[in-house]
Amino acid sequence: MKNQKFYSGLAIALLACSITFSSCRKNRDKDPKEEPDTEQSTATDNNLAEGTSSDIEAMGSQVAESYTITTYKSTYGNNILSMAPCASVLSNTVAKTYTVDFGTTGCVGTDGRVRTGKLFFDFSGSTPATAIYYRNPGFKLVVTSANYVVDGNAVTINNKTITNTTPAGAPAGTNLTWAVSANISIAKANNGGTVSWSCNRTKELTNTSDPLCYAGQTTAIDWTKAKVKINGTTSGTNAKGESFSATATNLVRDFTCAPDVTKPHRHPFISGTISYTPGSRPVRLIDFGNGACDFNGTITINGQTWSFTLQ
């Protein structure tokens, strides 16, 4: 058993926790007497859950690749990243578990998030037993939490499981794939209500042919060079208690893309869509663009389109 210092910059931190909409509504050629459907809180709550769940998976995949946190210890030649260690990792390679502990006073990472509490990762259920790394076919990671809080939002992981579904013995150049399921609840800061969220997703490492990212099963994935595509469904309730469902289609994240130099480990989706339906309202379509490295996107409701910026 070993105890190591952990920088929570989260080299592959995923979707940010909220979206801010601008007022550039288009297509206002409808009946002016018709009340427009502008409900967007479900999108915000969905993205809060997306980001929280994805960040947890990001931490698990990093540590599970090498049982070290050397990626997080790098200085990258950037003073912003040269912060004091703000969490610890306790690994048990015999029990096949590890714990990430953010403490109780507030751990500020290079993604700009403030975290407290603990995350527990267990890969003892992997099949075969020799599948001990995130990159190995059959690797299975089960995640739980204790008093885990992100930016004042209290997160409860009811269950979260990531399974490597890459065929064993797949030829070189085959993209690695994972099945991801999760059921989490988030009590929002300042008594903002509780979001319930569950998902069934597939995740694909799309640049396995790039040796700088993936050089085969004997070498850990370099997530800072990764390009990932996500597909699948989600459902739950927003902070107002209204149910919603959503489908993610070809969401792409390039982890070499970090639009904000002050938050170098915040990597937004740069293309793909999420269509979601809040209650009995019409479908909303979130579009993350065509691959430009930025925080921008659009949301379309009933033919009207707004711009948004990921936060």
Image: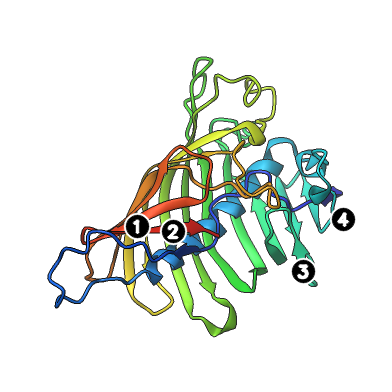
Whether pointer 1 and pointer 2 mark residues with C-beta atoms closer than 8 Å, the reply is yes
- Vertical side of 258 occupied by 308: above or below: below
Secondary-structure class at tag 3: loop
Compared with 84, 105 (above or below) is below
> Which class describes the residues within 10 Å of circle 4: few (<14), some (14-19), or many (20+)?
few
Picture disc at residue 308: 2
Report whether 120 appears left or right of 227.
right
Q: Please tell me which of labels 1 and 2 falls first in the chain.
A: 1
Residue that numbered label 1 is attached to: 299
Name, please, the residue furthest toward the top. 171
Q: Nearer the viewer, mark 4 or mark 1?
A: 1
Q: Position of residue 7 (x, y in %)?
A: 79, 51
Marks 1/3: CA–CA distance: 34 Å
Residue bearing mark 4: 84
> How many dots with numbers?
4
Q: Tags 3 and 2 in contact by the CB under 8 Å rule?
A: no
Label 4 sits on a secondary structure element that is loop
Whole-angstrom CA distance, mark 4 to mark 2, is 33 Å
**Residue bearing the label numbered 3:** 106
